[in-house]
């Protein structure tokens, strides 16, 4: 039986830093074609693809455009979809959608930078989570009030996000949730994997404290609801738990690093092949 | 019935100011939210509905936020976003079956490596477009300059006569404009006649397909073929070159009020 053909839509960062093991495995079991953001020329009149499925590992504008073209011009499935990626990178939008779907998220607000913070304790996060740089928090504790700002958010603010904000500066505030653990949930299709770690604000070396944990039914229900709401098929989702035991979804990611799961590259590869054969 | 109306607009003058005047004269309360004071939070729930005048991304977010909280937003934020994002707009046009220019999208080095000399001339457009800002004709590789390592969106340049066409309900207003100019420059009024019936047909198809009350289109008639290309759709113009005697503002405002009533009625029906 011939191998399925899987197209990988990827940027150079993910190709060189995150996908080596995955591609090594995938090339054993499938025919693989690479579409690299930095060297791909998208032509609106060229949609002749012979792949059985596309997998997206990146979230830049060109990657999004290529996913849109494939979805519009062909019937080839793409994981994750345009809608899923768009919802995941537009932080304000996924907060709105998830809250509306009944998934608890920390209180949030998007306001001009000149305005006072809307919460006593807060995290300022980037509005569009599209670039490949890491979360770099500046943390202040002022009389017990925790004030965190992600350097990416401040850079984005001064550069004018989305290229059309001119001199107007906006900040996305998320209410700070004090949590002993940060729960990291990976979803690959129907499969779900549970981990916890000390929050990165307390210990930036997240892997030092990360451990696999047993399934938590409440988180499982919330995580699958989040996947359904956003349209993602492969994702990692962060949850925090306040002192009353309530969980809050604090982050959702469309390009999870599945190297952190035992046999992650193989699990993802097998899932993609199964989907390609459908 | 007196209503509280919010206008999401980057400025308080122009069409926004005129709409405020109209609504206030009709007894409504109006608040304009510019980028200086738009805070997207529950405070926005104070209005009965919103007019989405600006296409900037925070306004799109605000529109979605309001809609998700059952507050009508006119025009619909999806429509506004899809008109503004070049990729979305391309497929929006393609879906209607209307003719449109093809495009290339890639990083500068990729474009230099893979385009051929006879692919030029092209039009460079910002991926999130608004008016003529950032648009330039590219005639050779030398014109391709990197900008923040972002990919460049380049559209095939159609050599021909450029038109701006406004529409409000069934009224169509055609103007001949200098290529790549914005809505506000001086333009030549084109009377509706048999010679531009094809342009009118494009407008009718566009507005019917998406059930639009008003808007504008950039259209080019190609010199060589006489074919009509829809190059740029727009959702909420200033109507600064509207050439009919009748002032467009009351018409627009009444259509917005009518759409609000329809949405309210449908919401009640859905409940």
Image (tube, coloured by chain):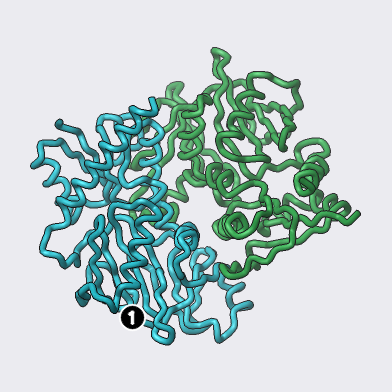
| Residue in the image at 26% along x and 49% along y | B9
Q: Can residue A250 be seen in this view?
A: yes
Tell me residue B7's x, y (percent).
24, 43
In the image, residue B51 sits, relative to residue B108, either above or below, namely above
Instruction: State which quadrant residue A13 falls in.
Output: bottom right
Instruction: State which quadrant residue A231 falls in.
Output: top right
Q: What is the display colour for chain B?
A: cyan
Which quarter of the image is occupied by the N terminus of chain B?
top left
Instruction: State which quadrant residue B32 falls in.
Output: top left
| Residue in the image at 70% along x and 63% along y | A49
| Residue in the image at 15% along x and 32% along y | B2
Q: Is residue B204 left or right of residue A148?
A: left
Residue denoted by label 1: B161
Tell me residue A47's x, y (percent).
64, 65
Q: Which of B43 and A4 is in front in this view?
A: A4
Q: Is residue A151 left or right of residue B172?
A: right
| Residue in the image at 74% along x and 58% along y | A51
Q: Chain ID for label 1?
A: B
Q: How crowded is mark 1: few (under 14 residues within 10 Å), some or many (20 or more)?
A: some
Residue ranking furthest to the front: B194
In the image, residue A93 sits, relative to residue B148, either above or below, namely above
Number of numbered discs present?
A: 1
Which quarter of the image is occupied by the C terminus of chain B?
top left
In the image, residue B36 sits, relative to residue A204, either above or below, namely below
Q: In this view, does B192 lie to the left or right of A225?
A: left
Residue ranking furthest to the right: A1
Q: Is residue A141 visible?
A: no
Tell me residue A152's x, y (percent).
51, 46
Chain coloured green in the rendered structure? A
Please tell me whether mark 1 sits on a helix, a strand or a loop. Answer: strand
């Amino acid at each position: 039986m011939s191998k399925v053909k899987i197209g990988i839509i990827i940027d150079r960062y993910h190709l060189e830093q995150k996908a080596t093991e995955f591609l090594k495995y995938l090339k054993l079991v499938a025919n693989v074609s690479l579409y690299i953001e930095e060297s791909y020329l998208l032509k609106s009149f060229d949609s002749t693809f012979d792949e059985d499925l596309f997998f997206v590992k990146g979230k830049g504008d060109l990657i999004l455009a290529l996913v849109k073209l494939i979805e519009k011009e062909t019937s080839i499935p793409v994981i994750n979809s345009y809608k899923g990626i768009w919802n995941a990178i537009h932080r304000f939008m996924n907060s709105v959608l998830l809250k509306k779907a009944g998934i608890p998220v920390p209180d949030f607000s998007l306001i001009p930078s000149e305005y006072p913070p809307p919460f006593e304790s807060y995290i300022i996060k980037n509005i569009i989570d599209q670039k490949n740089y890491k979360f770099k928090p500046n943390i202040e504790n002022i009389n017990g009030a925790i004030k965190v700002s992600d350097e990416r958010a401040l850079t984005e603010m001064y550069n004018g996000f989305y290229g059309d904000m001119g001199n107007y500066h906006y900040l996305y505030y998320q209410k700070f949730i004090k949590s002993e653990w940060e729960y990291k949930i990976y979803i690959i299709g129907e499969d779900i994997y549970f981990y916890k770690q000390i929050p990165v604000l307390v210990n930036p070396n997240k892997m030092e404290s990360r451990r696999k944990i047993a399934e938590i039914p409440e988180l499982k229900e919330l995580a699958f609801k989040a996947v359904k709401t956003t349209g993602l098929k492969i994702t990692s989702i962060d949850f925090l738990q306040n002192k009353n035991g309530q969980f809050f979804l604090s982050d959702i990611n469309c390009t999870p690093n599945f190297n952190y799961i035992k046999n992650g590259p193989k699990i993802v590869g097998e899932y993609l092949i199964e989907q390609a054969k459908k | 019935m007196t209503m509280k109306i919010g206008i999401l607009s980057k400025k308080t003058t122009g069409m926004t100011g005129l709409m405020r005047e109209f609504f206030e004269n009709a007894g409504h309360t109006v608040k304009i939210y510019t980028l200086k004071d738009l805070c997207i939070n529950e405070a926005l729930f104070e209005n009965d509905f919103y007019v989405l005048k600006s296409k900037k991304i925070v306004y799109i977010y605000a529109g979605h936020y309001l809609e998700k909280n059952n507050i009508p937003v006119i025009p619909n934020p999806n429509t506004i976003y899809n008109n503004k994002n070049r990729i979305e707009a391309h497929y929006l046009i393609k879906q209607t079956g209307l003719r449109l220019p093809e495009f290339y999208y890639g990083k500068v080095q990729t474009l230099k490596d893979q385009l051929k000399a006879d692919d030029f001339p092209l039009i460079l457009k910002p991926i999130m477009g608004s008016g003529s800002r950032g648009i330039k004709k590219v005639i050779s590789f030398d014109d391709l300059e990197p900008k923040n390592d972002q990919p460049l969106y380049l559209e095939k340049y159609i050599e021909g006569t450029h038109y701006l066409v406004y529409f409000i309900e069934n009224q169509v207003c055609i103007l001949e404009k200098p290529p790549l100019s914005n809505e506000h420059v001086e333009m030549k009024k084109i009377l509706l006649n048999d010679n531009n019936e094809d342009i009118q047909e494009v407008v009718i198809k566009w507005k019917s397909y998406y059930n639009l009350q008003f808007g504008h289109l950039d259209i080019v008639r190609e010199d060589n073929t006489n074919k009509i290309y829809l190059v740029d759709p727009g959702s909420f113009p200033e109507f600064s070159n509207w050439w009919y005697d009748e002032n467009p503002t009351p018409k627009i405002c009444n259509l917005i009020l009518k759409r609000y009533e329809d949405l309210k009625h449908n919401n009640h029906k859905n409940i």
